[in-house]
Each structure stands twice: as C-alpha cells, then as structure tokens.
C-alpha cells in the first residue's frame, strides 16, 4: 500500500472533530467546571458511552464498539480497585499501571483488524482477549507483589523525567508506538475511525494521568467515547458524500456543489477510454486500480477545479469563476498528465495475459489503442497506461442551468470520442461541422 500525500484537507480531517473535542475537554477541565457538578459529569459519562454503544451497533461498526468497550472496562477496573479496602497495598494504582499499558495495545490491535461488523469470527477473538486481560489485571491487583507487577516498574529513561505522572514509562512508550501506528493507518486509508481512535486514546491517557478515579478522569474517559461517536458520524458522512474506492467526492456531493452556482463557471465530463475492454482483459481488480490512478490525477487538477466521481468510469470537474476556454487549458494539462502516467502489473497480475507468441501478438494488438502495454519477461512485469476523453462546457448569461451545461459537456465528450479519443473538446465546437477523422477504436 502507498502512503497518500498529506494535504490541507487530510490534515483538517485528522484534526476535526477529534482534536477539537479533546481541546474543549482540556479547556473545561482547566476552568474547574468539572469539579463544580459531579452529577453532570456522571450523566455525561453514561450518555457518552451509551451513545457510543448504540451508534456502533446501529451502524455495524464492530471496531468502534470494541474500542468503546475497552475504554469502559478500563475506567471500570481502575475505579473498582481504587475503592478496594485492602490494606497495605495500592490496588487502584496497580490497576492504573496495568490498564495504561494494555489500553494502547488494545487500541492498536483494533485498528489493525478489518471491519467485519458483528460476525462471530471478528468479535469472539476480541472478547477472549478482553477476558484474559481482565483476569490478568484482577490477579495483579489482588497480589501487587506478583512477578507481573514488575513489568510496569522498569525504567527506560531517567525516573526524574517522569516524576510528574503516575503512568509508567513503558506505558508511555506503548502509547507512542500505538499513536504512530494509528497515524500510519490513517495515512494509508484516510478513515475517520483511525483518527478518532488516536484522539480517543489521547483523551484516555489524560484520564489515566488525572488519577485512579474522580470526576476529571471520568470526564476524559467520556470524551474518548464522544470522539469515537463523532468518528461514526464522520464515517457515515464520508460514505454518503465520498466514493469509497477512489476517495473523490461522489454524485451527491456533486449535486450539492452545483446548487446556487454563480457565473461564470465551467463543467467538464471525463471518461476513461476503452475502460470496458481494459476490465475484460485484465480483470476488475486492475480496473479498480485504473480508476484510483485516474482519480488521483483528477484530485490534483490545476486551476482550482473540483473533481467528482459520477459513477462507473465517468468523472466530472467543476471550475468556479472560470470560462470554458480558461478551463480548457487546465484540462489539457490534466489529460497529458494521465497519458504519461504508467503503472506495473507484477506477479499473478500478469497471469491474465497470454504467454509466449500469443502475448507478443496481444501486445502488438494493444498498441493500436490508446492503452499502452509494455511486457518484459526479464523484469517480470507488464507496464500499462490509460488515456481519457473530456468534454467541457461553460455558462453564459443565456445559459445558466446546470443540467443544460452538463448535457452540453456530455455531448462534447462524445465528440472527443468520435474524433479519436484521448482529447479534450469544448462545447463551442458542437455548432461547427464535424471534421472527418480516422477512429482509433470503436
């Protein structure tokens, strides 16, 4: 998997809403609002965790539900052993030390697993792990002098550096590793669940650092649950307005973006050339890779264009405040960029191609199309590239309806295909007599 390039949008989605919620909780804690009403904190705690469990169940978010359960059990274990009347020991602090190490480990394991809803094969292993960990914490707290307790008292660095916290050094190390893994997961998938889990883990560590129990710790644990609830809502929004495969805004986002457009503006329709033939030749998995490749280039279109996936192999680009002639320059640059982009099929992907003489014949045949195929036996890969056709239309004082302009752009797209594909046509050319051109493909 490739790491996606971080942009302002990705940084914003990483910080919001999880980071904002955590900052708000820290601000309220500093203002001593939490200590003013313990009953409000308790209500906040139970509402947050109740909403987390309910929404995770309703949206079949098995990973988020597991994270909410882990956070709830962590707080429950610390508070239970903190109230223990056992003399001559510190079971509450022992529970805090054990939980502070196990919590980031569990969050990382949950983030590493695939989302499979509430199937037995996905929930059973997590339940078994939580049960074993609960027994371990209970045994450790019942006998703090047990060998397992020494795990959390080791010093990786100078102890004076950590005199401000009750959390062991090994737990801080586990937190850094878990946060690093969550950032890595987010860089690959860009899912709200990864960013939400990271911020929830940070809030939970503020709760642990606040002490074994108390309203402040409860408030931070509740904030962790609220952050996970927000990640569920963000995930639902993303699924509704973004294409899951390519990551581009989807048809619904396009429809909303075109509401109330002010002149001038331009719309372009983009279609991948010979995509059906490409899918039939190399398979749907490679076809999905092609869609992602084209979408990646579309997301970086110049001129302030906004790209959308309308469906199938068809995309749209919206240029606000630009005429069709101005947009044409940026679209031509985009077309050339896509044409120059190649990707390689390795290993089992090449099995779909013919072998020996048949492969060479296939390669020669493919050279007649805009899709380029370069085969290398020694290097063990097949290099592919695709082209796109585009049609663009712009608004004017007499033509403002978005649907009308979209139809004109679509007609210009078909003109581009009729004129040989791998080109950009403007709707103004529709009124001109069509020149005879040799078609490269039917």
Image (spheres, rainbow, N blue to C red):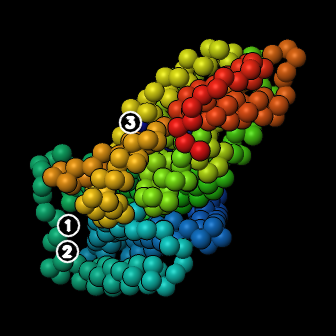
> Badge 1 is on which residue?
152
Point 41% across, 47% down: residue: 366
Q: Are marks 3 and 2 in contact (CB under 8 Å)?
A: no
Q: Quadrant of residue 358?
A: bottom left
Horizontally, residue 284 falls left or right of residue 236, namely left
Could you tell me if the residues under marks 2 and 1 are in contact, i.e. CB atoms within 8 Å?
Answer: yes
- Residue 291 screen position, x and y as percent: 50, 48
> Circle 3 is placed at which residue position?
341
In the rendered image, residue 220, in percent from the top left (x then y), is placed at 49, 55
From what the image shows, is residue 433 above or below residue 442? above
Q: Is residue 154 visible?
A: yes
Q: Which residue is mark 2?
A: 149
User: Dot 1: what SS?
Assistant: helix
Front-most of residues 427 and 120? 427
N-terminal of the pair, mark 3 or mark 2, is: 2
Question: Is 66 above or below relative to 172?
Answer: below
In percent of the image, x 26 and y 80: which residue is there? Answer: 140
């Amino acid at each position: 998997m490739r790491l996606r390039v971080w942009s302002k949008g990705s940084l914003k989605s990483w910080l919001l809403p999880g980071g904002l919620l955590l900052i708000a909780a820290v601000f309220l804690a500093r203002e001593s609002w939490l200590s003013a009403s313990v009953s409000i904190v308790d209500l906040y705690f139970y509402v947050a965790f109740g909403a987390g469990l309910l929404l995770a169940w309703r949206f079949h978010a098995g990973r988020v539900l597991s994270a909410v359960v882990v956070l709830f059990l962590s707080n429950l274990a610390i508070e239970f052993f903190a109230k223990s009347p056992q003399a001559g020991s510190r079971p509450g602090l022992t529970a805090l030390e054990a939980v502070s190490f196990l919590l980031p480990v569990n969050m990382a394991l949950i983030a590493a697993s695939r989302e499979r809803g509430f199937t037995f094969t996905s929930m059973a292993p997590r339940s078994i792990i939580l049960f074993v960990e609960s027994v371990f914490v209970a045994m450790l707290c019942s006998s703090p002098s047990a060998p397992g307790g020494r795990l959390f008292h080791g010093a990786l660095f100078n102890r004076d550096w950590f005199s401000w916290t009750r959390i062991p050094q090994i737990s801080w190390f586990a937190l850094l590793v878990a946060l690093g893994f969550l950032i890595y997961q987010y860089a690959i998938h860009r899912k709200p669940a990864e960013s939400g889990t990271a911020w929830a883990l940070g809030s939970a560590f503020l709760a642990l650092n606040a002490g074994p129990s108390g309203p402040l710790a409860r408030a931070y644990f509740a904030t962790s649950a609220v952050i996970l609830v927000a990640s569920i809502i963000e995930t639902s929004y993303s699924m509704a307005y973004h294409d899951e495969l390519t990551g581009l805004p989807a048809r619904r986002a396009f429809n909303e973006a075109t509401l109330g457009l002010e002149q001038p503006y331009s719309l372009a329709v983009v279609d991948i050339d010979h995509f059906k033939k490409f899918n039939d030749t190399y398979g749907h998995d490679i076809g999905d890779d092609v869609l992602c490749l084209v979408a990646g280039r579309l997301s970086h279109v110049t001129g302030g264009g906004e790209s959308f996936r309308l469906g199938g192999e068809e995309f749209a680009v919206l240029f606000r405040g630009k005429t069709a002639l101005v947009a044409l320059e940026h679209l031509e640059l985009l077309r050339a960029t896509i044409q120059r982009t190649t990707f390689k099929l390795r290993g089992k992907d090449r099995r779909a191609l013919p072998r020996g003489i048949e492969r060479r014949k296939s390669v020669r045949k493919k050279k007649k199309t805009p899709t380029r195929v370069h085969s290398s036996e020694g290097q063990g890969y097949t290099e592919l590239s695709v082209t796109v056709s585009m049609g663009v239309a712009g608004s004017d004082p007499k033509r403002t309806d978005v649907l009308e302009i979209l139809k004109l752009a679509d007609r210009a797209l078909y003109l581009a295909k009729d004129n040989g594909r791998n080109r950009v046509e403007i709707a103004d050319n529709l009124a001109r007599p069509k020149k005879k051109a040799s078609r490269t493909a039917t």
